[in-house]
Amino acid sequence: MKVLVMSDTHGLLREVEEIIQFIHPDRVLHCGDSEMDPKISPFKEMIMVRGNMDYASDLPLARTLRWKGLKVTITHGHRYHVKESLHSLQDLAEETGAKIILFGHSHFPLCREIRGVLYINPGSLLRPRGYPVPTFALMELAERDDGFEVEVSFYNRSSFMKLPDLGGRYKG
């Protein structure tokens, strides 16, 4: 399953549509700060959470999804102090039982495994911080006899080039 993960798009529409056309994902997850009406395309087809810059009150602050026994929790991160550390997200992972935590807010792309939980921040499509280009992420999930495997790739939003210094392959 191909899962497109984006965050902090801050009003971008055309660029979001171009990325979806480029990736052709099975599912799109948005980690908040879209600053768009979640009832319009392509946002109405996404699974979204509310960021600190989103004013759609019907969006939840966090969601936990299941894929064949794998739990994935999505949040924006502003309530978890993600600019300082991942400690509060580690508590969220324990609370929800998630093996993957997707988040945004810091505008910095990250893919790190800590104690069997994979933390992914796709970065920002509009204003990257601490990384030279705007980014989004692709998770390719595969079921295995002993669990799951996920390959995470990051892309440059401007050139659609894969970024070899980010991402990796993880088993759980």
Image (cartoon, helix red, strand yellow):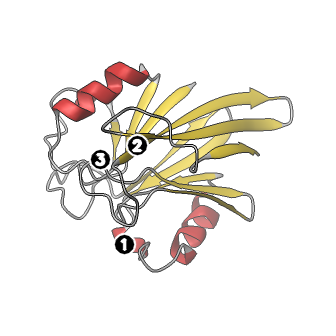
| Residue 155 drawn at (x, y percent) | 44, 39
| Residue 149 drawn at (x, y percent) | 73, 36
Q: Are marks 3 and 2 in contact (CB under 8 Å)?
A: yes
Q: Is residue 84 left or right of residue 55?
A: right
Please, what secondary structure does the residue beneath circle 2 have? strand
Which residue occupies the foreground of this view, 10 or 79? 10
Q: Is residue 79 left or right of residue 85?
A: left
Residue assigned mark 1 = 79
What is the three-letter code of the residue carrying label 2? Phe
| Residue 42 drawn at (x, y percent) | 23, 27
Please, what secondary structure does the residue beneath circle 3 have? loop
> Does residue 43 appear in this view?
no
What is the three-letter code of the residue carrying label 1? Arg
Residue furthest out toward the bottom? 84
Residue assigned mark 2 = 136
The residue carrying pointer 2 sits among few (fewer than 14), some (14 to 19) or many (20 or more) residues within 10 Å by Cα, namely many
Foreground label between 3 and 1: 3
- Quarter of the figure with residue 25: top left
Which residue occupies the foreground of this view, 98 or 7? 7
Residue assigned mark 3 = 125
- Quarter of the figure with residue 70: top right
Q: Which mark sits nearer the N-terminus, 3 or 2?
A: 3
Between the C-alphas of marks 3 and 1, the distance is 21 Å
Q: Which mark sits nearer the N-terminus, 3 or 1?
A: 1
